Image: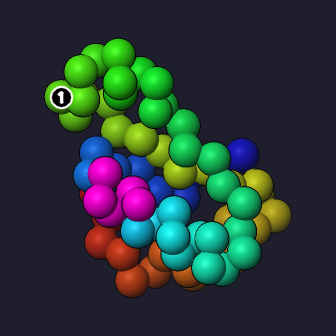
Amino acid sequence: MEEVFRTNDLIKLSYVEHLLQEAGIDYFVADQHISAVEGNIGAFPRRVMVQEAVKEHALAALAGVEKG
């Protein structure tokens, strides 16, 4: 899997998930559990991962979202 987005912002993460769902792209959010364990202090950003075959499509769907 390839990373297409990384953030500590849960609102932005929700928006990214929405955009990927609307584009019909399957994704996985990595590091959710470590973020919960560390108390959500923001030391470990969550990473949005997609299959390599759809990475360019995912990046195009997320082009308007500010990184971070």
- Which residue appears at 46% of the width and 66% of the height? 16
* Image spot of residue 11 (x, y percent): 29, 59
Kindly identify the amino acid type of the residue bearing the numbered disc 1: Ile
In magenta stretch: residue 63: no
Q: How many marks?
A: 1
Which secondary structure class fits the magenta region best? helix
Where is residue 1 drawn, in percent x and y? 72, 46
Residue found at x 51% / y 70%: 18
Q: Locate residue 41: give its quadrant.
A: top left
Say which quarter of the image contains residue 40: top left
Residue 56 seen in this snapshot:
no
Up/down of 43 relative to 65, above or below = above
Disc 1 target residue: 41
Examine the rendered structure and indicate whether residue 15 appears above or below residue 26: below
Magenta segment boundaries in residue numbering: 10-14
Residue at x 59%, y 70% (from the top left corner): 20
Tag 1 secondary structure: loop
Residue 59 image position (x, y, % from top left): 56, 73
Left of 27 or right of it: where is 17? left
Q: Residue furthest left?
A: 41
User: Which quarter of the rendering shows the C terminus?
Assistant: bottom left
Specify whether residue 12 is painted magenta. Answer: yes
Residue 53: image location, x then y, percent: 81, 64
Pick whichever, 7 or 55, lies toward us: 7
